[in-house]
Image (cartoon, rainbow, N blue to C red):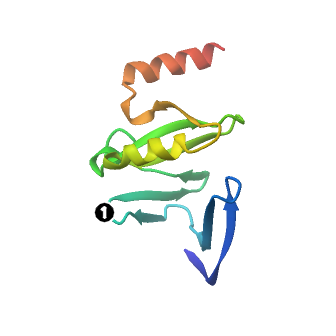
Amino acid sequence: MKLRLTDQPRKFHIRDGNITISDHGKIELNADEMVSFVTASGRECDFTAKKWGYYPTSSLNSRMKKEGFKTALVKNPDGKININVVEEDRIGEFDEYLKSHEFPPKVVCWLDELTLEEVQKIEKALLSA
């Protein structure tokens, strides 16, 4: 693993300058290395490197739920798709964040709530398309 933190974070604005993001650096993981991101409340979300890419979260319907997270598939009005990981007791704040946009993104579904049957239906629909 290589960790490259900056003394002075790069700052940039999004959403018409309403939000400032601070970029603190980079983490380079080798295959089968993991880093855990920890919220102020102590919940952990793991990010694991593989030879072929990344697991950006632990299992959505098991470990993430046990850690107190919900995972949303979100579509922006401009067609961009994101996965948002939300602390379950902060969903109200997440909803307010979505509503604060001039053209609000929409939660397509909560991925952690999908049943195996629903996932199989999605899989079948996609494979037959």
Q: Relative to 116, is 27 on the left or the right?
A: right
Q: How many labels does the image show?
A: 1
| Mark 1 Cα-neighbour bin, 10 Å: few <14, some 14–19, many ≥20 | few
Name the residue nearer the viewer: 3 or 92: 92
Q: Can residue 59 be seen in this view?
A: no
Q: In which quarter of the image is the N terminus?
A: bottom right
The extreme left residue here reads 66
Q: Residue at coordinates 42% horizontally, 48% vertically from top-left?
A: 93
Q: Can residue 45 be seen in this view?
A: yes
Residue 69 position (above or below residue 31): above
Residue 126 position (above or below residue 29): above
Q: Relative to 53, is 58 on the left or the right?
A: left
Name the residue nearer the viewer: 89 or 48: 89
How far across and down, in percent of the image, does residue 116 sit? 38, 24
In the picture of the structure, the residue carrying the numbered disc 1 is 41
Q: Residue at coordinates 45% horizontally, 20% vertically from top-left?
A: 120
Q: Residue at coordinates 61% horizontally, 18% vertically from top-left?
A: 127
Name the residue nearer the viewer: 77 or 30: 77
Residue 106 position (above or below residue 35): above
Q: In which quarter of the image is the C terminus?
A: top right
SS type, badge 1: loop
Residue type of the residue flagged with mark 1:
Ser
Name the residue nearer the viewer: 6 or 126: 6
How far across and down, in percent of the image, does residue 123 sit? 53, 21
Q: Residue at coordinates 59% horizontally, 37% vertically from top-left?
A: 105
